[in-house]
């Protein structure tokens, strides 16, 4: 698998993949990998984390390190009993991101969407 940045791909006009990356909040990015399974998404997140954390930049002559935490989720199209919506995917990824931060930052946490029977029942 050849790695290349999303911006390079867009600049060159060749977008053979359906993957997308975008800024989500001031400090978060969203990467959507519709053709990639949970394991592949975890591998990619770890590669990005390693690359980012391995770089040191300088500001005002002082070195600073950057870390990256990831919440990775997904689902199998064949899975029954899973509520797959954009909101459920974002909620699960956000939960996992906070778990990564709570675990010491600079880590990848991931698991697929849970079946409906494992979701908390909302209170009216």
Image (tube, helix red, strand yellow):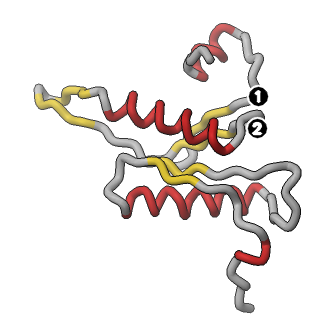
Looking at the image, do the residues carrying marks 1 and 2 touch, with CB atoms under 8 Å apart?
Answer: yes
Quarter where residue 94 is shown = bottom right
Q: Is residue 65 visible?
A: yes
In the displayed image of the protein, which residue is found farthest to the bottom?
Answer: 124
Q: Which residue is painted at 60% across and 37% down in the image?
A: 22
Please state the horizontal and vertical placement of residue 41, each as a whole percent of the image: 61, 39
**Element type at marker 1?**
loop
Residue 83: x percent and y percent? Answer: 81, 65
Side of 68 relative to 9 (left or right)? left
- How busy is the neighbourhood of tag 2: few (under 14 within 10 Å), some, or many (20 plus)? few
Closer-to-camera residue (107/52): 107
Which x, y percent locates residue 59?
19, 30
On screen, residue 7 above or below 78: above
In the rendering, which numbered label is found on residue 34? 2
The correct choice, above or below, for 102 with respect to 33 in the image is below
What is the spatial separation of the Cα atoms under label 1 and label 2, in whole angstroms?
7 Å
What residue is disc 1 on?
A: 18
Q: Residue at image x 63%, y 36%?
A: 40
Which residue is drawn at the image coordinates 62% and 34% (left, top)? 21
């Amino acid at each position: 698998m050849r790695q290349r940045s999303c911006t390079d791909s867009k600049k060159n006009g060749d977008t053979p993949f359906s993957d997308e990356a975008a800024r989500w909040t001031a400090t978060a990015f969203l990467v959507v990998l519709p053709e990639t399974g949970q394991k592949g998404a975890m591998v990619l997140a770890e590669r990005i984390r390693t690359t980012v954390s391995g770089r040191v930049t300088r500001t005002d002559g002082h070195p600073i390190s950057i870390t990256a935490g990831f919440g990775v989720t997904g689902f199998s199209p064949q899975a029954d009993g899973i509520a797959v919506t954009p909101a459920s995917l974002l909620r699960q990824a956000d939960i996992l991101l906070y778990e990564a931060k709570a675990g010491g930052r600079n880590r990848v946490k991931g698991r697929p969407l849970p079946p409906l029977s494992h979701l908390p029942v909302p209170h009216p």
